[in-house]
Image: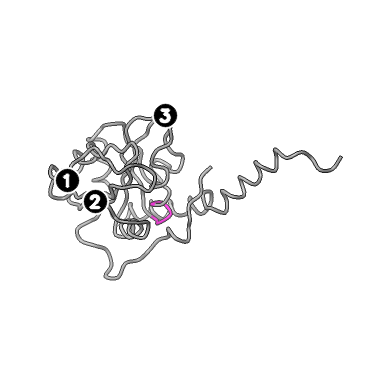
Amino acid sequence: GYGVDLEFFQPITLEGGESEPVVVASAGVANRDYRTLVRAVQDVPADVRIAADSAWFPSAVDIANDGLPPNVAARSYGNYTGLRGLYAKSAFVVVPLYPARHACGYAVIAEAMAMGRAVITTRTASHSNFVIDGETGYYVREGDADDMREKILRLVNDPELARRMGRAARERMEAEFSVETYCERMEQVIAATLPDKNP
């Protein structure tokens, strides 16, 4: 189970309307395949902004700022408020992952979806069950820059599709993955392990 703070991470309408050019966000450091993302977005008509830090893992990623194409920038966004601001500016979020048999990217995926953003992420052996392929975002093949590029261009070129998927993503988080729902599930699990007090 997992729960996301739906009050902190909620859809935000920025003053001035949609940004130009399109902003595509990515975030996190654990198991992130940013090399594939960078290959996928070369010459894509979008500004790609990577929040390359984590509160949970050492801040080391597989790319260097001095070798990035001009439409890509990676830096720290400081804290969760800064990260939330990045999600708010973005049209959608990409979470590229290396193959893994453990959970990776769950927090970023859940936060972005709670913000009403479609998510493109890698389908790994232990991929999250948050994204519904074709409804709240897309899964892409591991290490496949062409597949990732095709999905990114699909959303860049169809802003209404990105918004529709984002609304569906928020609805999914509200229905199944709020902190409150998570706590209720945990309470049920704990209660099931307690001895019956009524003989």
89 or 132: nearer the viewer: 89
The correct choice, above or below, for 186 with respect to 170 in the image is above
Pointer 1 with pointer 2, Cβ within 8 A: yes
Pointer 2 with pointer 3, Cβ within 8 A: no
Q: Residues within 10 Å of mark 2 (few under 14, many from 20)?
A: few
Q: Residue 121, percent across and down? A: 34, 40
Disc 2 residue type (three-letter): Arg
Q: Residue 187, percent across and down? A: 65, 47
- The residue that disc 1 covers is 65
The residues colored magenta run: 112-116
Q: Residue at x 38, y 48 (%)?
A: 55
Q: CA distance from mark 1 to mark 2?
A: 8 Å
Disc 3 residue type (three-letter): Arg
Could you tell me if residue 157 is visible in this image? no
The correct choice, above or below, for 79 with respect to 182 in the image is below
Q: Say which mark, if any, is on residue 75.
A: 2
Mark 3 or 1 closer to N-term? 1
